[in-house]
Image (cartoon, rainbow, N blue to C red):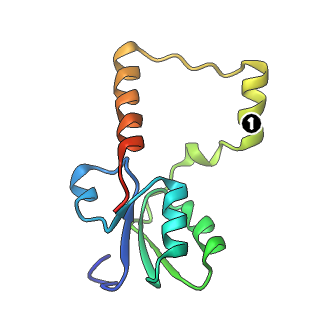
Amino acid sequence: MKEKHPEAKFIAHPECRPEVLELADHIASTRGMIMYAKNSPAKEFIIGTECGLLHGLHKAAPEKKYYCISEFACCPSMKMVNLEKILLSLEKLQHIITVPYDVRIRAKEALDRMLAVKTR
């Protein structure tokens, strides 16, 4: 993608593999990616996260161009989640998810890494 769009800034989500993050011009959460693209003087961006973010980017800065890192960077499970469903689940204590301890520990480490990432 960088060869196809050499002027584009590469924005990556902290959940990307370390070797991908090394190539990024900016690392940020979903919201941080939108704010970076909106406030950046750059006009083109390669997006290293779920392709659904393109809608938010176009909404925030429609005059800029965005390229999804891969057409396969779509998460069907994420498409099923919305604020109403989250609220309902929390109010009714539905859909409680339990995971094995070792999975929980690894997930918490991933969250901690995301929260610790400093933007470039």
Question: Residue 68, position in %: x, y?
Answer: 45, 69
Q: Quadrant of residue 60?
A: bottom right
Q: Which amino acid lies under the numbered mark 1 shown in the image of this protein?
A: Lys
Question: Residue 17, position in %: x, y?
Answer: 28, 49
Up the image or down, 62 lies above or below 94; here it is below
Q: Residue at x 55, y 73 (%)?
A: 38
Q: Nearer the viewer, residue 118 or 105?
A: 118
Rendered-image quadrant of the N terminus: bottom left
Up the image or down, 83 lies above or below 91; here it is below
Mark 1 is surrounded, within 10 Å at the Cα level, by few (under 14), some (14 to 19) or many (20 or more) other residues, namely: few
Residue topped by disc 1: 85
Question: Residue 19, position in %: x, y?
Answer: 21, 55
Q: Nearer the viewer, residue 25 or 69?
A: 25
Question: Residue 66, position in %: x, y?
Answer: 49, 76
Q: Residue at x 54, y 65 (%)?
A: 34
Up the image or down, 83 lies above or below 58; here it is above
Disc count in the image? 1
